[in-house]
Every structure is written in structure tokens, then in C-alpha cells.
Image (tube, grey):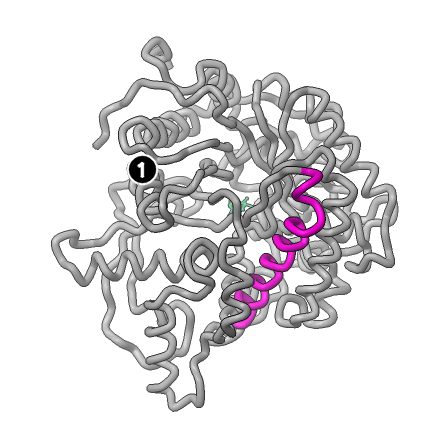
Amino acid sequence: MDTYFYGTFPKDFSWGVSSSAYQIEGGWDADGKGPSIWDNFTHVPGNINNNDTGDIACDSYNKVEEDIYLLRALGVKNYRFSLSWPRIFPSGRNNSINSHGVDYYNRLIDGLVANNITPIVTLYHWDLPQALQDIGGWENSELIDLFDSFADFCFQTFGDRVKFWITLNEPQVVAWVGYGAGTFPPNVNDPGNAPYRVAHILLKAHARVYHTYDDKYRASQGGVITLCPNIDWAEPKTPSDPRDIEAADRHLQFLVGWFTHPIFKNGDYPEVMKWKVGNRSELQNLPSSRLPVFTAEEREYIRGTADVFCFNTYTSKIVTHATTQLSPSSYEYDQEVLTSVDSSWPSSALSDHRAVAWGLRRLLNWIKEEYGNPPIYIIENGVGIKTTSDVDDNTRIFYYKTYIDETLKAYNLDNVNLRGYNAWSFMDSFEWLNGYDPRFGLHQVDFGNPNRPRTPKRSAVYYAEIIRNNGIPLHLQLF
Ligand code: BGC
């Protein structure tokens, strides 16, 4: 299980690095940008570790050329970033187009294309225009039309050069952390209901945008479009106990199948979700399931709305079955599983992010089996380290070496249809509730310096070597 495999990927394998708008751009109110829910949330003292904000972040809004220079030095084939909706539509609607925001993304995209770097563009990485939160955010089904009109504008404006679109980054986090646990804005703490309603709207919004691309742009632009769930491998606690095997699969169905079963399978939620949430709702004497139901027409509309399978992954979990608990009513309890981590797995700064490289190989095989061997892109993978001066980041090198090695095994030994791998993150950036600590970057950013200088870490040099060799051939053993 832990032996190294030496080998390479196919010639057109897409190596890249990833970022997101709010985490790196800064310029939070520059040139007419509207406020997002993250701008407002971070401006309230006490909400974020160390009261950090993304007001300036890595100042990438003013550093297009420098960022492209660093990407060239890495030798990446693609760069995945996101568009800030309120930078383009300050009020969230297409009656408020901010040409400065559009210019910024045009400069970035032109620079990438000029350097043969494929842009992979996310339309929504959590920074909702505040104006749209004011009408209820993703709890309001008007957001389906509004997101579609934003996406339509982006296809029309950037689609001549952007051929790889991601609608939603980690919809499970949007639904659960934003509307269930409530720790991310909009901080709705309604764990039994809102996440299911929000996910229902997110799925419809995703499907609408996919169809807009299909109907209006695909023929002339010829790109691909999908969404990007977060998936951590779920390892059954006692692999010889069928109840734990089922529980681990159930956990994956609630985490990822929630979104990908409708899209990659039959237009509907996984059977086990319908059964568990339905049954528990009945036991609560509710008139109907807390999990909403799609009409036949909606199922047909949602099914098949992804061209490739993208996902983000960081760690693995141990899962065991739990006996039915009636209360509280919560997405977490509905799963009837208990999750934990194995304390022997190497820990990183984020307590629940353990480095478990073999979990990624199992996960890739699970995706292959579950969804019929789709083309797969790993869009985020990396490790956070809690130190401001980790230029000499051997821990990160070890993480990448072992994780990439497991993807090599999945590709070469298990025939997983893997097409690309992106490291998170291009550079140290704003880590949501954690502020600027821990650091995930291949490049260090000095946040104490107004110029936000970037310094390649040892891991950047190592990753560039992996890219240059298209994998880990035998002679790369030196590292
Ligand atoms: C998110 C990133 C985040 C990373 C590390 C992912 O869930 O997509 O925005 O920085 O995790 O915490």
C-alpha cells in the first residue's frame, strides 16, 4: 500500500495550480466592485482568526503580470481561478456591469492564453454579492435566474478564450457550512432543513447554467462545463463489518452523491439519502420529507449536466455506523454515521486534515466505479501548514509526492481516467475562518509587506520538476 510507484501520465495531462477570487484578489472595493457576503462578514471583528480580512489579500487584482510570470516558472498547463461575481456585477444583476472588473479578468485571461496556460474558470467560489444575500441568497429560487444571467454574461464575454468552466465550487460547503452549521456566511443555523433546500436550488442553478452553455455557446466555443464537489475518502472503521462499509458509502453519498448522483446518474438524489431523510422525517411526524423532491421534468433537466468529473480533496475520514437518533434533526445525524480520524495519520495544521495519500487512490477508484469511469480532474489538493515562514516546506513536498504518487497508481495500475491534477494553492492566501494561518501555498506571500512579495517555496521547485517530468519517473527519486 505504501510503496512508491514510478511512472508518468499521458502526454496531454493537465498540470495546474488553483486559487479563488476572494482568497487572493484583494481590491475588495476597488474600481466599483460591489461588496460580497465575505467582505461584510470579515469586516465584523471577531469573525475571523486574528481579525484578518481579504481586503488586500495577495493583491492579485494589481499583480496580473507577476502572477503570470510565476505560473510560467512553474510550467503549469492550466490555472484554475474564480471570477468574483460582485466585481463584475456589483449589485449581482446584469444591470450593473463593472467594466473595470471585466478588464481585470480580460487581462488575466489574455495573459494566460498568450503563455499557453489554459484557464479553468470557476463561476462561484462563495463570494456572493451582498445585494443577492439581501433577497435571501441561495434560499431564494430567484438565484437560479440571477446566477444564469451572470454565467451567460461570462460565457459571452470570456468564452472565446475560456474552454473549461466550473459552475459551483464545493456546493456541499455552501449548503452545509453556510446554511446548516452556519459558520460561513450567511451564517444560517438550520441544520435539518435549509441545507437540503439550498442544495436543491444550487442543483437547479447549475443545470440551468449548463443548458445555457449548451444552447447558446457550446457550438461556437466548444468548451466543457461541470461543477466541483469536495470529497474526502471515507474508510470503514471495521472493514470486515458490512455495516461500516455501508456507512462509509452512505457518508460519501451524503457528501458528494447529494450533488453528483443527480448529475452523473439519474437526475435524482441517492436512494440512501431519500430513504434516510424520508424515514427520519416520518419518525418526526413531519408531513413530508425534509429532502425536497424533483419533478420528472426537473430530473430530466438535471441528469447529464456535466462533461467531466472535477473534485477537491485534502484528507480522509474513518466512518462507522451509528444507531438511529431521532434528534436533533440535522443533515449530519440524518447520515447515521460517526466520523473520526486515525490518530496515527500524520496531522497538519487543520486538525481534521490528515495526510492519507492512499485514501486518494481509493477515492479515485470509487468515483470510477460509481460514475462509470468519467474523465476526472483533481482541482484542489494540498496541505495547510501553520507557520508564516515555511519556504523550506519539506512537509508539503512529502504531501505532494505521496498524493501524486497515489494518483499515478490509480492512473497506471487501476485505469482510472485521470486527466489533470491541480495543487492548492498557487500561493499563500486567505483561508476563510482561519485568516492567513495556516498556509497552503507553493509560493509564500509576505502579508506584512504592502507589496505582497511572493517567494517560491521548495515545494514550488519540486512541483515544477514533477510537471517537467510529467509524473514521477524513476530518476526523480532524488527528491
Ligand atoms: C476550498 C478552498 C480552501 C481549501 C483549503 C477548499 O475546501 O475550496 O477555498 O482554501 O479548501 O482549506
Secondary structure, magenta segment, majority class: helix
Left of 88 or right of it: where is 291? left
- The relative height of residue 111 versus residue 217 in the rendered view (above or below) is above
**Residue 87 at x, y percent in the picture:** 78, 48
| Residue 387 vs residue 343, the one in the foreground | 343
| Residue 55 vs residue 252, the one in the foreground | 252
Task: Look at 64% across and 49% down and name the residue there.
Answer: 214
Task: Look at 67% across and 52% down and name the residue there.
Answer: 215
Q: Is residue 434 magenta?
A: no
Q: Is mark 1 within 8 Å of ligand 1?
A: no
Residue 405 picture quarter: top left
- The relative height of residue 432 versus residue 145 in the rendered view (above or below) is above
Q: Which residues are magenta?
A: 197-221
Quarter of the C terminus within the rendering: top left
Task: Decide if residue 402 is in sight here.
Answer: no
Q: Is residue 215 magenta?
A: yes
**Residue 70 at x, y percent in the picture:** 64, 21
Task: Decide if residue 383 is in sight here.
Answer: yes
Task: Look at 60% across and 36% down and name the residue there.
Answer: 80
